[in-house]
Amino acid sequence: MNKFIVQAKETGERLDKFLARKFPQYSRAYLQKQIQKGGVQINAHSEKSNYKLKAGDKIVVAIKPPEAISLAPEKDIPLEIIYEDRDLIVINKPAGIVVHAGVKNLKHTLVNALIAHYPLLGQVGDEPNVRPGIVHRLDKDVSGLMVVAKNNQSFAYLKNLFKTRQIKKIYACLSWGKFQEEKGEIRLPIASNPKNPSRMVAVQNPRDPLNQKAKSACTEFKILKQFDKTALIKVYLKTGRRHQIRVHFKSIGHPLVNDRLYGYRRQIFLGSGRIFLHATQLEFVLPQGKEMKFISPLPEDLEKILNLESGIMNQE
């Protein structure tokens, strides 16, 4: 149990920000949850996270540390590190691996590999016992760049960058069909599919009841190469909704090649058969103010599909 008396210079500061200063080992989101659970008392009363402190307030903090990480470290899982400093790691995620644990995935995840190399990640993030250091994710069969926080200060910083859309994320995908325009923008809100919780849906009718639960989503794209039956596309994510690229391109009649969840019912699978979607570029500013830009070329299996499409186009 910890006790504090608010000083005059701390007047007006939010309760959660005050606690974040006093307990830098915890993320702000975790502290907010503890406040909500009643683990923090001000003048013998519970208050909300946004409570503005007053000089002389007596704060009693009785919060429990996050549960110890229960995930098993797995050194055998390959981890391609693109960049690393004291605050963060940039990795090139391979296809076929889940980012973090879930009910059905307690082993063989990217997180299992991360904690094998960085044991201290077990205390980083909102849910360090499930997804330590993870500030965003890629679907299982999607490959490419990801950034991971190594401490809670970095976690809060990166999470805010994503929230305020200060991280530039660019993807490459291959979609079915011919596009009439070289550039485009898809602005459709996205909601969970009430008939299938593993799927999302783009809400095209503002009067649809799902629109009340949908979140705004924006995807910009540029056609890099139009083939006979497919198109190679550069995608700029303006928001980061679950399955956003996959759902948005399906909504305009151009599902991604090899997308088993949102593709055509009778689709033809090309090459390796895994979805053609790769996170190629990541740009953001480090806490020290340095601008960083990371690029990941298409992996071999996707390059083979492009070579196949080029051959088909040339033959016809």
Image: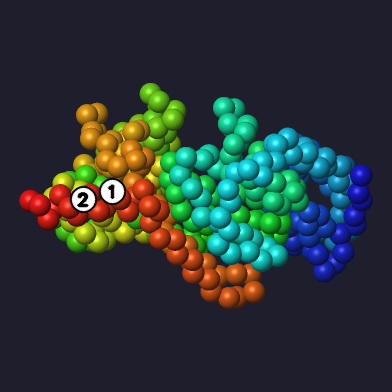
Quarter placement of the N terminus: top right
Nearer the observer, 56 or 234 = 234
Badge 2 marks a residue whose secondary structure is: helix
What is the CA distance from the residue labelled 1 to the residue labelled 2? 6 Å
Mark 1 and mark 2 residues within 8 Å of each other at the beta carbon: yes
Badge 1 marks a residue whose secondary structure is: helix
At x 21% / y 44%, what residue is drawn? Answer: 176
At x 56% / y 55%, what residue is drawn? Answer: 80
Task: Kindly identify which residue carries mark 1.
Answer: 305
Q: Does 240 appear above or below 285? A: above
Q: Tell me, yes or no, if residue 106 can be seen here.
A: yes
Badge 1 crowding class, 10 Å Cα cut-off, few under 14, some 14 to 19, many 20 or more, is: some
- Residue 197 as seen in the image, left or right of residue 152: left
Badge 2 crowding class, 10 Å Cα cut-off, few under 14, some 14 to 19, many 20 or more, is: many
Give amino acid for label 2: Glu
Query: How many numbered circles are shown?
Result: 2
Q: Tell me, yes or no, if residue 45 can be seen here.
A: no
Where is residue 28? Give x, y as percent: 70, 52
Residue furthest to the top in view is 195
At x 40% / y 42%, what residue is drawn? Answer: 243
At x 44% / y 61%, what residue is drawn? Answer: 296
Give amino acid for label 1: Ile
Where is residue 150? Give x, y as percent: 68, 56
Task: Kindly identify which residue carries mark 2.
Answer: 309
Q: Does 28 appear above or below 264? A: below
